Image (cartoon, rainbow, N blue to C red):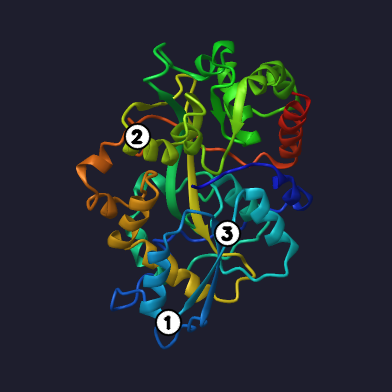
Amino acid sequence: MKRRLFGLIFLLGIFFGCKEKPAPTPAASAGPGPSGSGAPTADKPKPGKELNLFAWSEYVPQEVIDGFSKETGIKVNYETYASNEEMLSKLLAGGTNYDLIQPSEYVIEALVKQKKLAPIDWSLVPNFKNIDPKLKGLAHDPENKYSVPWMTGTVGIVVNTDKIKDPIKGYKDVFQKKYKGRIVSLNDSREMVAWALEASGLKSNDITPENLAKVKPMLAEWVKLVKVFDSDSPKTAFLNGDVDIGVVWSGEAALLYQNNKKFSYILPEEGAHLFIDSLAIPDSAPNKVGAMMFMDYILRPEVSKLVSEKFPYTNPNLEARKLLTPDQLANPASYPPAGERETFRDIGKIASEVDKLVTDLKASN
């Protein structure tokens, strides 16, 4: 399942200071051709024969890749990563020319600042119209110039209600001494710091040296209680009976709920943030046309539905949601109650301090 470990955003910090020039929004950009199909026309460049996709592992269904290749003749080379930091490290190091990457929102923001992404020609992605308007014009890509949402979700609490009868409302209810050795936590420094900030009455993006010092004692206690740190498949510890409570990705929680409704999903009362994973094109991509064709393909409702069936996060494609079953739409982890939720913002060089803080606390435990 999708992972969002945090760490090396500071690699981009050495380039800070660059500012983006204003650019037209999709509505002002070149629109779909006369046919409305988004297919390349005679006056547009043709796609390459191969597409190098660099994305989260267990996040792109094979049938989606196969369907795209069968229709277009473009071979898709799907290389996976387990964290945003791994993706950034390989992208910035060069050596491999990726055509498509799948960063989280705050990573897109950082890459845009450093001019590392290519703008999208919306005439090749007419199905962008299917995206929920609420997910357009957000802080990480305010002009909708560089990214297409893949899936969104929340981070919340899963409780095995057969084992834990106490009311659980927030992070402080999870990280209690009586649950020591029964807790699973995402192995994600930015996430854990955000939880501690919110549990302290601060905002998830209020990351300063002073606030890190403030939440350090809380985090030090929390890491001692955790049995498993797992961002890959935290649901596995629940299914194996190794843990009874934890903080996980909403897609993982949705799969647990599908398996057995004893697994309850709770949005933390201190605050739940929204994450957005999107497709974006590196500025060095050799097959930009093929990349945009893939973007448009996955935005077809019937294709986007396949992604939801395999990985039940919140689908940003409103037309695809119409194809989901009532049970899928009723899954409280996939489609939790509406509410105001922040997204993570790029925090620059202090990201290294976030990573060091949590790593050191784990090592001293």
Q: Amino acid at mark 2?
A: Tyr
Of callouts 3 and 2, which one flags the residue occurring earlier in the amino acid sequence? 3
- Along the line of sight, the residue nearer the viewer: 308 or 233: 233
Residue 2 appearing in the image: yes
Assess whether mark 3 and mark 1 are in contact (beta carbons under 8 angstroms). Answer: no
- Along the line of sight, the residue nearer the viewer: 263 or 113: 263
Where residue 29 sits in the image (x, y, percent)?
A: 44, 66
Q: Which residue is mark 1?
A: 73
Q: Which residue is mark 2?
A: 257
Q: Amino acid at mark 1?
A: Gly
Where residue 124 sits in the image (x, y, percent)?
A: 41, 72
Q: Which residue is mark 3?
A: 80
Marks 1 and 3, Cα distance to the nearest angstrom? 22 Å
201 w.r.t. 112: above or below: above
Residue 301 horizontal side relative to residue 216, left or right: left
- Residue at 70% across / 22% down in the picture? 211
Q: Secondary structure at mark 3?
A: strand
Q: Secondary structure at mark 1?
A: loop
Of callouts 1 and 2, which one flags the residue occurring earlier in the amino acid sequence? 1
- Which label sits in the foreground, 3 or 2? 2
Where residue 184 sits in the image (x, y, percent)?
A: 55, 29
Q: Amino acid at mark 3?
A: Thr
Q: Secondary structure at mark 2?
A: helix
Quadrant, the C terminus: top right
